[in-house]
Amino acid sequence: DAKTTQPPSMDCAEGRAANLPCNHSTISGNEYVYWYRQIHSQGPQYIIHGLKNNETNEMASLIITEDRKSSTLILPHATLRDTAVYYCIVRVGGSNYKLTFGKGTLLTVNP
Amino acid sequence: EPEVTQTPSHQVTQMGQEVILRCVPISNHLYFYWYRQILGQKVEFLVSFYNNEISEKSEIFDDQFSVERPDGSNFTLKIRSTKLEDSAMYFCASSGLNEKLFFGSGTQLSVL
């Protein structure tokens, strides 16, 4: 699996957009970008994933650069409950493949 | 939203004892996983299970570990002879065909 690089921590004001970057310069053509988050030692929670097109769901938006070497997760209106560790994971598509978690980014949403 | 259920939430055991961690995956899911997280460290993959057999396992998943899906609904992780270093939060996860993994809330295992 391609390695990813994320900043160790970020802050965001409540109500503002949180933009979490991820570099994955060695991504292969068949590898997807997945985002999960973990709220204070709870089980990780799926957020969104994509291959090359931008994706949006009820939780977030995923913007992938044209060369696919980096991506940004956008939480459009961050709340205090979005404080969590956010993991960017690159992996071959398909359900029968493991996720390899890195250290992620600790996002702290401040009132 | 459907949930992955894990029991117990906390398990305390003596070194050398056997423990079984239990999970009820989401009912129509086909792929099952165990991960663990030692306090302050990364979430680590242990094993994946599909079609009643192990699909992949990590170096951590040695002969002391085993998994089973005994009755079509439960998914268990057994540690035969626990060590101090097995103390961790153990997460069960399941997925269907849409590649989203759903994780349970974990079992905190403390080996004394």
Image (cartoon, coloured by chain):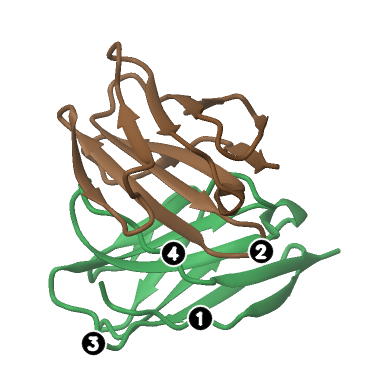
Chain colours: A green, B brown
What's the residue at 72%, 51% (across, down)? A81
Nearest to the observer: residue A37 or residue B91? B91
**What element does badge 3 sit on?**
loop
Disc 1 from disc 3: Cα separation: 18 Å
Residue A67 numbered tag: 3
Whether labels 2 and 4 share one chain:
no
Whether labels 4 and 1 share one chain:
yes
Q: Mark 2–mark 3 contact, CB under 8 Å?
A: no
* Image-quadrant location for residue B70: top left
Residue at the disc numbered 1: A6
Would you place residue A80 above or below residue A58 in this image? below
Residue at the disc numbered 2: B40
Q: Residues within 10 Å of mark 2 (few under 14, many from 20)?
A: few
Would you place residue B94 above or below residue A107 in this image? above
Disc 2 from disc 4: Cα separation: 13 Å
Q: Quadrant of the N terminus of chain A?
A: bottom left
